[in-house]
Image (cartoon, coloured by chain):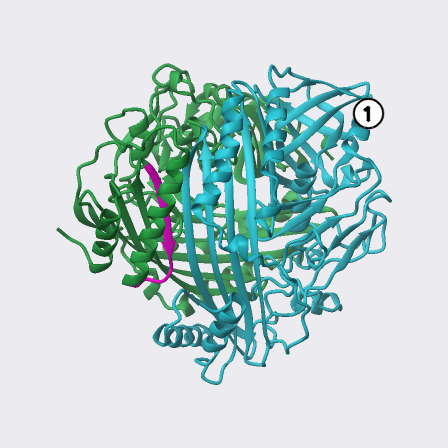
Chain colours: A green, B cyan
Amino acid sequence: MKSNSLTSSALSEAKRLGATYADIRLITKERENIIVRNGSIANMDSSTSEGFGVRVICRGAWGFAASSRVEESEVRRVTALAVEIALASSMAKERDVVLSPEPPAQETWLAPSVEDPFQVPVSEKLELLFAVDEVLRKSPRIRVAESGMRFDREHRILATSEGTFADQRLLLSGAGYSATAVEGSEVQIRSYPNSFGGQYMALGYELVRSLHLLREAERVREEAVALLSAKSCPRKRTTLILDGSQLALQIHESVGHPTELDRVLGMEANFAGTSFATLEKEGKFRYGADIVNLYCDSTIPGGLATFGFDDDGVRAQRWYIVKNGIFVGYQTSREIAGLLGRSRSTGNCRAEDWSHIPIIRNGNLSLEPGDRDLNDMIAEVDDGIYMETNKSWSIDQKRLNFQFTCELGREIRGGKLQDLVKNPTYQSMTPEFWGSCDAIAGPAWWTLWGVVNCGKGQPGQVAAMSHGASPARFRDIRIGIPDEAS
Amino acid sequence: MLEPSLEIEQIARNALRYSNGADAEVIATMSENAVTRFAENAISQNVSRQGLAITIRIVKGKCTARVSTSSTDAASLKHAFAKASTLVAFQKESADILPLPNPRPVQPIPAYESSTAELRAEARAAAVLKAISKCKKAGLRAAGICSTGWGALAVANTKGLLVSHKDTTGTFSVSVQTGDSSGWAEASHRDFGEINVDKLVAVALEKAEASRNARSIEPGLYTVVLEPAAVAELFQFMGWFGFGGLGFVEDRTFMAGRLGQQIFGENITVHDDAFHPLQRGLPFDFEGLPRQPIALIEKGVAKAVVHDRVTAQRAHAETTGHALPQPSVEGPMPLNLILASGDSSVEEMIASTERGILITRFHYTNLVEPMKLVLTGMTRDGTFLIEKGKVTSPLKNLRFTQSVVEALNEVDLISREPETMLADWGPGAYTVPALKIRRFNFSSTTEF
């Protein structure tokens, strides 16, 4: 059986102290983060974090402890602490923790990539970022130009008392930029290829090269400036077409989170909330129109939640959450699947790093592409609006009422994209929204978008995942915010 | 083990030894945090983590680079400095990179309670069991957290600067659910023993029970009574997007170009003060410079924003000691906001309201527009209709979309007793009273 001395120490100590289950994750995470802002370096960071976390089940309850001191004596101390914590947990349990079955595996897994981003010279990265910065700042109305790159690589070892030993190497690359235009009391921003840092994928530096960052910089600058004098978003109900990047966040918030089964069962009630997608709805509830198919895929190349095994040691899978508009599946962990007597976890149990306990996180949840040409989808709209790139998002604690604002909108009149609209905002209720979907663009417009700032849990932890989407059209959606808001 | 301040200072001093003559700064942090989490009347997660992080930064001319490690051994520290030197070598000079600061005296803030630092899992479980038992007895479901921990931070540089701070934090947060409603209460204190768990559970239970069979109400403009947790949420965004020096010098906040002007009602006074007895915070910033109490708004008049040395230079001002780790994309940030109290109470606010809404807290608040600070979010865990001076019925939750700048021009009453809330994400604490606001916009509603 594969192991190393540290994992063996943890597992044998846990067993000696009476644990019926134990696992240890040894993780080394390296990050490089470079940001150029208004002609200056605003961030030039290289970080390495190393540590381990031990989970145990004793007397039917969980305990978890973690430390950054990676030494045998510390592993034994932390394991004993995890057992102490589990025994304390058993003071207030309703039932024993039961894990759904999963055959043990001993494998290595490596995120495929072409060009190691950590081997690309920093000088080359800076040259590109400064070149973008120079183009963005050619207008005096651009008060903030920010361009950046981030690269993560992680070596993650999981060893369990059931015999799993998963040795995985994960990778993340991301790049993007934004231009903020200011004039009087008006502030507008445009980003490329996406907001809040750009596009991220589990790929190497080939991702950065594929984004053609410099090519789009002039357009981004001009759009930011043009938005300063654009018309405001009207308040009405209308036909809405969303670009793929905004739809990715829509999927994340209104399908991903409500189908995390721990939320459904009340585990996040004190903080992130619960879910309207309750158990009796599975297999029956109409989540969206017939053409809406949403699937989760931990095997998809380049996905930020793509791996060989999750932190429960469950192998990566692909399954439907919504099929032909009907709600058919959840995202689970071994504990939560076991709680409901399900035969297997879907493998969604992940932790931010060594110091956090694994919990259910959104996987790579995507909208299947349709068969429509985006140009035809627009041409069929007599009066509507197109919105692109997220700027603001908010949703209620059961994941029903949501409101999103995008960076840029364009009126659609007579089947054509017309005037720019600033602060384009839409609001709806989740099933009503997905139920109003009447067209989805085809594979040519489909992109796997990365989300790197998903927060959940107490203590809070951040996870990354990807959501694939083509632009889609929705009928009779409320847009705009009331004048009384400001 | 050494006392935390001494240990973290030793770690920071030791790390600087490997600077090899470079101008260098070290930020060292050490912490141990434990969270006993419960849901559906049982402990659901129970965690403890201990960590150490050392960030070294070198400054060479007008170039800088940072390298972080979680190791204190000589090889790791040598590697970190070597890496930083390599990263600096490829840069062209940046105007915003300043030389390291000289030391200045810092007034300490006593914030460490060893009883909280040493609290064990069994004691946390006992507190949780108390809460769960009360809720079970009432036939309701409890969820929440009981957390305790300590942290130590030191900043040191090769100009002889060395400052450190240690603190403890205890938090108890509880949500209570019935079949169709919920209530919530939370408190934090450096001494966990000061937290009255029974009182928090009682408040959450009362709100949950009072929220059963909620009715709907049409969205629109309403008078609101915001409890301190809801006010704190608004102030969190004022801190992030309003009072920082970087947005100010870039003309993209409501404070830009408005110093000396009336921008809020005369009853609004806002300070940032880490030394306030109800506040929680560092006495120095992330360059090791003293964090100064500062008046941001006085009787509605914009007085100042917070600065670090970079934004101070641009604004022809002095640093106020609010730097985040340098260089910073966000710029300086106020971390200890205080809204001055008034002479009213939540009960008096309710009694004086003809028709309005009483709000416990907000959920998933986000920025829509920065210059008027238009925010959107949901109400949560206790939302009630007020009619003719009385709470008459619970309400299904509503979405607000409202300019905070406009709202703070419509404050009728401010309560006497403030509460301190910790930020949901990142450092920061908000000491705020309750507010009665004449007109507050709700743009839509939800089903529960």
Chain letter behind tag 1? B
Q: Is residue B215 left or right of residue A216?
A: right
Q: Which residue is mark 1?
A: B351
Residue at image location 59% in from the left, 47% down from the top? B193
Q: What is the crowding at mark 1: few (fewer than 14 residues within 10 Å), some, or many (at least 20)? A: some
B280 relative to A455, above or below: below
Residue A413 visible in the shown view: no
Give the SS element for disc 1: helix
Question: What is the magenta range?
Answer: A61-71
Residue A323's x, y, as percent?
A: 33, 21
Q: Where is residue A130 shown, x and y percent of the image?
A: 51, 64
Main SS category, magenta section:
strand
* Vertical comparison of B97 with A139: above or below: below
* Quadrant position of the C terminus of chain B in the picture: top right
Pick the residue in front: B93 or B123. Answer: B123
Which residue type does callout 1 highlight?
Ala
| Res A357 quadrant in image | top left
As rendered, which of A373 and A26 lies closer to the eye? Answer: A26
Q: Residue at x 60, y 17 (%)?
A: B212
- Residue sticking out furthest to the bottom: B21
Count of marks, rendered view: 1
Q: Position of residue B259 (x, y in %)?
A: 81, 56
- Quarter of the figure that contains the N terminus of chain B: bottom left
Q: Can residue B16 be seen in this snapshot?
A: yes
Q: B379 or A211: nearer the eye?
A: B379
Residue A389, x across and y down, in percent: 52, 40
